[in-house]
Structures are given as structure tokens and as C-alpha cells.
Image (spheres, grey):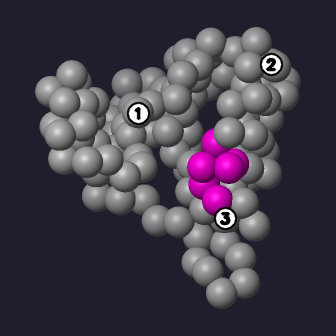
Amino acid sequence: MQSEAQAQKELAKILDQAGLVWTATANGGKRDKRTAASLKLSGVKAGVPDILIFTPPPTGFGVGFALELKREPSEGKQKGRVSVHQRPWLEELRRLGWRAEIGFGLQHSIELLKGAGYTI
């Protein structure tokens, strides 16, 4: 089973190869208090989805695609959970016309992106 970080690294390669306009956010990971405070003052917001794809989904549903990556379920471990900071971001992005999804592992994330019409 891949960690969330490993899945995101693999997905980054796939998105680059597909030629999409996208970015990963600076959320997540362990930081010392000083770095966390600096990032917050710089505008980093808690809960922003891990991947933001600015190339609109080819299916025509959504002005962009936001993907929150979570660990896939495996033997002895539950799938990752959406935090109290992440849920409002997903809801607000949907309200603004984005497609906002939760991908449980690499394969599920790829399925979601293909379902939106991306050729990856």
C-alpha cells in the first residue's frame, strides 16, 4: 500500500505527462512552529485540497478540478478521513463551479480524473 505522499508523487508525474495546468498546495506535512507561522502569514490556508487542476475537465462539468488525496484502505488500516478544515473547502469550491473530489489512493484518483474526461 502506498502512503498518501507516495501516491501524490506518482500522480504529479502523471499530471505533468498529460500536460495539464495544475499545482500542489503547501498544506500537510510536519513543520516547526516558526515555518508554520510564516506559511500562514504568507496565505497558506488549512484544508485547501492537495491538487488543484486549472485545466477545465473535458466533460464540461466544472471550471477546474480539486482533488483531496487520502490513504486508500488496506488490511488493518482504514481509508484516510476528510478533516474539519478540508470539508468546507471542497463544498465552497463546488459552489464556485469546481469539480472537487476525494481520491482514496492513486488508482481511485486516476479513475476520478478519467471520469472527468482527462486523458491520463
Residue 35 location (% of width, % of height): 24, 37
Kind of residue sitting beneath label 2: Ala
Q: CA distance from mark 1 to mark 2?
A: 22 Å
How many labels were placed on the picture? 3
Residue 94 visible to an observer of this rendering: no
How far apart are labels 3 and 2 at the CA level? Answer: 23 Å
> Tag 2: Cα neighbours inside 10 Å, few (<14), some, or many (≥20)?
few
Q: Earlier in the sequence, mark 3 or mark 1?
A: 1
In the rendered structure, the answer to whether residue 38 lies left or right of residue 76 reads left
Q: Give x and y (percent) for residue 120.
A: 84, 28
**Magenta residue check for 6:** yes
Alpha carbon distance from label 3 to label 1: 21 Å
SS at mark 3 in the image: loop
Give the residue drawn at x 76%, y 29%. 13
Q: Which residue is mark 3?
A: 72
Q: Quadrant of residue 117?
A: top right
Write down the region rendered in magenta.
3-8
- As drawn, which residue projects farthest toward the bottom? 76
Return the residue at label 1: 26
| Magenta stretch: dominant secondary structure | helix
- Mark 3: few, some, or many residues within 10 Å (few <14, many ≥20)? many
Classify residue 46 by image quadrant. top left
Amino acid at pointer 3: Glu
Q: Which residue position is annotated with label 2?
A: 18
